[in-house]
Image: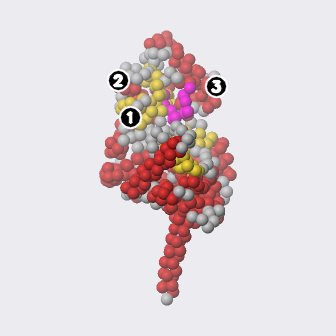
């Protein structure tokens, strides 16, 4: 209908929050994945040819809602089916006794469509409709059970219609078993360049940004550049700073500052209003404290009540702090959080990681040490694999070494004694050295101890040696030596080793030949670096102090 065309082709985005833009200006069709097969979703029939019951699943910011709106317009042009676009979050305002048929068809009447009851029943029975249901994950949990039941009954009664749902990932979609799940695929480089090229934006800025994407920027920041929402943030950052910094923490600092002072691209002179009326420094300080507390608790999503209570409980808030106004600023002005169904979530978890690092950086040495060590010990896997500690290290390398690395090393070295430091660390980390019978490769069996986890964390801050012929040769020799030991034991009436053979660490280290080979392997080099890390850090600090002392003495003279 004409009313459908008037309402649906234009949308607001992060770039165009005041004046909506035509969908055709910036829509870039994504690839969808079914099993190992991928196809371009540039036509709704490409999806409906797979099944008339489809669920499109993808993370936030990949453009699921935009895709369903595109399918709506695509089907309006085809005129094969009558499309009905529904935002399922609208059901959250209904009671448990809502009528799903009435709810769906009200969306049709809102756009000017009307059917006589007998004609409507006939059209539903014959399958003349395409139902595009956006945001299954945005349904309140208290409504989802009722929706699942009523929706299943609706599909059973009118199975000839077509249904496309969108949702963020769930552990499973147990109540949607008839639906074929298609996963969104991150944008490739060609799609990213195409999207940027089509966005109505300053031509010179876009050209410079595209040139850098072509010249390695896409590969360097693939996780952002392949996500339409985060790519937009990159473009905003590039507009203000003319480049994307190599340092990750500088990228986030620029991104947040851009969002703080963003002028709308379509309204010259427009500056977004902050309802909280806080200064820039106050906004950052409150948000960094919030990010630290939620990061420490492993929380990335919050109900309205959780979010309000957490913000109210923050220490040292400005006297003028008003929680609802601040939530509005986070979600509507800054866009670092968004309302995802019934829960508030970070637009990207990296914002939480960045501001946690900012919080720790701004603490005294004593507090930084206390909180950082607790984070490492509570979840060393996360400490190794997310970006928070990497960014903290880049922000303030010397304080990071002083307050994080050295205290961890001190704890590990409490019992080192006068023996060989290499031997001590190796024995504390590994219980045995062995060889796999099938692959003939050696392995180290780990001790299940905090020492190992701390080592895993700290090795990221020691330079990794490049693979070399000497280390590879030594590793091959070590595997051969272990196999000979295994064969020797078996020949001397020892046990038959089916899967693997191993030697206890103390025995292995006491054998001169294997000990020399070990020190030449990559793991041996890592352990040697680890054993010398404390001295290396202290030596560097002393050299830096000496440089400053010399400078001060010269200045005084």
**According to the image, label 1 marks what residue?**
31
* Residue found at x 65% / y 48%: 310
Q: Position of residue 147 (x, y in %)?
A: 58, 25
* Sooner in the amino-acid sequence: mark 2 or mark 1: 1
What span is colored magenta in the figure? 164-174
Question: Which mark is first along the chain, 1 or 3?
Answer: 1
For disc 2, the marked residue is: 78
Is residue 162 positioned above or below 231 on the image? above
Image quadrant where residue 92 sits:
top right
Residue beneath the point at 46% across and 56% down: 517
Image mark for residue 96: 3
- Which type of secondary structure does the marked residue at label 1 adopt? strand
Measured from the top left, where is residue 293 in percent x and y?
63, 52
User: Along the horizontal axis of the image, is 312 left or right of 64?
Assistant: right
Q: Secondary structure at mark 2?
A: helix
Q: Neighbour class for label 1 at 10 Å: few (<14), some, many (≥20)? A: some
């Amino acid at each position: 209908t004409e009313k459908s065309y008037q309402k649906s082709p234009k949308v607001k985005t992060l770039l165009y929050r005041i004046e909506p833009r035509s969908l055709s200006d910036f829509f870039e069709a994504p690839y969808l994945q079914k099993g190992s097969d991928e196809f371009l979703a540039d036509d709704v029939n490409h999806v409906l040819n797979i099944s008339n019951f489809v669920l499109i699943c993808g993370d936030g910011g990949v453009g699921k809602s935009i895709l369903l709106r595109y399918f709506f317009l695509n089907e309006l042009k085809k005129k094969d089916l009558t499309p009905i676009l529904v935002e399922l979050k609208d059901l959250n305002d209904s009671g448990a006794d809502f009528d799903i048929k009435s709810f769906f068809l009200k969306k049709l009447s809102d756009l000017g469509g009307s059917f006589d009851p007998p004609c409507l029943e006939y059209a539903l029975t014959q399958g003349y409709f395409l139902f595009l249901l956006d945001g299954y994950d945005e349904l309140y949990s208290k409504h989802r059970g009722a929706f699942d039941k009523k929706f299943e009954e609706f599909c059973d009664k009118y199975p000839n219609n077509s249904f496309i749902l969108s949702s963020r990932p769930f552990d499973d979609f147990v109540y949607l078993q008839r639906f074929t799940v298609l996963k969104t695929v991150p944008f490739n480089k060609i799609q990213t360049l195409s999207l940027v090229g089509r966005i109505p934006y300053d031509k010179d800025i876009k050209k410079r940004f595209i040139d850098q994407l072509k010249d390695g920027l896409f590969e360097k920041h693939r996780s952002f550049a392949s996500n339409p929402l985060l790519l937009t943030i990159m473009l905003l950052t590039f507009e203000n700073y003319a480049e994307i910094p190599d340092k990750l923490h500088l990228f986030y600092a620029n991104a947040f500052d851009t969002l703080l002072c963003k002028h709308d691209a379509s309204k010259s002179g427009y500056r977004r209003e902050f309802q909280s009326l806080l200064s820039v420094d106050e906004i950052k300080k409150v948000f960094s404290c919030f990010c630290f507390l939620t990061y420490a608790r492993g929380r990335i999503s919050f109900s309205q009540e959780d979010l309000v209570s957490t913000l109210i409980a923050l220490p040292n808030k400005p006297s003028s702090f008003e929680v609802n106004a601040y939530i509005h600023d986070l979600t509507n002005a800054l866009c670092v959080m968004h309302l995802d169904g019934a829960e508030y979530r970070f637009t990207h978890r990296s914002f939480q990681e960045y501001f946690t690092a900012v919080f720790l950086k701004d603490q005294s040495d004593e507090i930084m040490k206390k909180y950082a060590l607790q984070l490492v010990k509570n979840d060393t896997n996360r400490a190794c694999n997310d970006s928070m500690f990497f960014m903290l290290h880049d922000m303030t390398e010397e304080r990071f070494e002083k307050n994080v690395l050295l205290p961890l090393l001190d704890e590990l070295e409490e019992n080192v004694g006068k023996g060989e430091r290499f031997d001590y660390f190796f024995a504390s980390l590994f219980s045995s050295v062995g060889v796999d019978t099938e692959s003939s490769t050696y392995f180290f069996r780990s001790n299940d101890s905090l020492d190992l986890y701390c080592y895993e964390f700290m090795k990221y801050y020691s330079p990794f040696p490049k693979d070399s012929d000497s280390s590879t040769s030594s590793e091959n020799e070590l595997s051969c030596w272990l196999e000979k030991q295994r064969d020797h034991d078996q020949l001397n009436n020892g046990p038959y080793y089916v899967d693997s053979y191993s030697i206890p660490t103390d025995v292995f280290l006491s054998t001169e030949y294997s000990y020399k080979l070990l020190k030449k392997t990559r793991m041996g080099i890592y352990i040697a670096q680890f054993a010398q890390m404390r001295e290396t850090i202290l030596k560097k600090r002393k050299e830096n102090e000496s440089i400053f002392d010399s400078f001060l003495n010269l200045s005084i003279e």
